[in-house]
Image: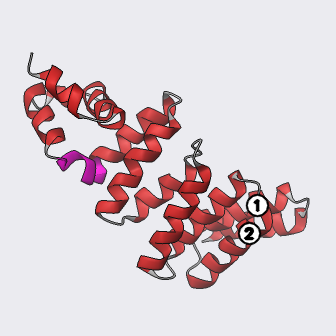
């Protein structure tokens, strides 16, 4: 009986967050009522230790729109490199809104390499390959990250530049 008002109050992403937490085995640690109270006050939505596995659960369950909403809400509360890395891997039906949100984070955080990587991944998913290359190259100029080299290598391969792809993949392994 205590669960029904919570279901009516919460968005689908919050309901699935609760389901993901329960399925992830957290119910073995906390009674379900305590978990529901945490979700009610929004604590879980802001904690990456909870958001990351729940978002992965949603992605594995082929629900990228809900995963995007969950990660976006967590990023609004507090920027985190791991969350923005995951955000770049989510390809929701609202890809343009994802790009807009990532651009707003870039304005807030400055030239942050993880956000630039995220923008590169989202631009690739959107088919804007030259824009993706620009974001990824800029990210490497700010701070070289192995993941950025790997994504740029995949983009170079997609563009048919095998030599550049090989160079990027080698850098990804070396760094």
Queried whether the magenta region covers residue 47, the answer comes back as: yes
Percent position (x, y) of residue 83?
Answer: 41, 57
Rendered residue at 44%/41% (across/down) = 67
Specify whether residue 173 is in view.
no
Q: Are marks 2 and 1 in contact (CB under 8 Å)?
A: yes
Q: Mark on residue 34?
A: none
In x, y percent, where is residue 10? 25, 35
In the rendered structure, the answer to whether residue 119 lies left or right of residue 65 reads: right
What is the magenta segment's predominant secondary structure? Answer: helix
Let me know if residue 52 is in the magenta part: no
The local crowd at label 2, few if under 14, some if 14 to 19, many if 20 or more residues have their Cα within 10 Å, is some
Residue 18, visible in the rendered structure: yes
For the residue pair 59 and 167, the one nearer the viewer reads as: 59
165 relative to 113, above or below: above
Q: Quadrant of the C terminus?
A: bottom right
Q: Which residues are magenta?
A: 42-49
The residue at the point 21 percent across, 33 percent down is 9
Rounded to the nearest angstrom, the CA distance separating label 2 from label 1 is 5 Å
Characterize the local packing of mark 1: few (<14), some (14-19) or many (20 or more) Cα atoms within 10 angstroms: few
**As displayed, is residue 4 above or below residue 112?**
above
* Residue 43: x %, y % from top left: 17, 49
The residue singled out by tag 1 in the image is 128
Identify the residue at horizontal 17%, vertical 20% (top origin): 4
Front one among 154 and 71: 71
The colour scheme applied to this rendered structure is secondary structure
Residue position marked by numbered label 2 in the rendering: 131
SS of the residue under disc 2: helix
Quadrant where the N terminus is found in the figure = top left
Report the residue that reaches farthest toward the top: 1
> Circle 1 sits in a helix, a strand or a loop, which is it?
loop
Residue 140 at x, y percent in the picture: 63, 78
């Amino acid at each position: 009986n205590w669960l029904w008002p919570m279901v009516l109050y919460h968005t689908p992403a919050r309901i699935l967050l609760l389901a993901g937490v329960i399925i992830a085995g957290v119910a073995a640690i906390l009674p379900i009522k305590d978990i529901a109270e945490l979700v009610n006050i929004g604590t879980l939505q802001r904690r990456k230790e909870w958001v990351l596995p729940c978002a992965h659960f949603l992605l594995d369950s082929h629900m990228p729109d809900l995963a995007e909403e969950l990660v976006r809400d967590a990023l609004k509360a507090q920027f985190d490199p791991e969350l923005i890395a995951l955000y770049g891997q989510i390809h929701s039906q609202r890809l343009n809104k994802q790009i807009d949100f990532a651009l707003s984070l870039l304005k807030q955080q400055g030239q942050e390499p993880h956000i630039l990587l995220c923008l590169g991944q989202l631009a690739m998913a959107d088919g804007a390959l030259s824009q993706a290359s620009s974001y990824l190259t800029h990210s490497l100029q700010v701070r070289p990250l192995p993941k950025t080299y790997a994504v740029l290598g995949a983009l170079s391969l997609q563009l048919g530049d095998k030599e550049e792809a090989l160079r990027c993949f080698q850098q990804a392994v070396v760094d």
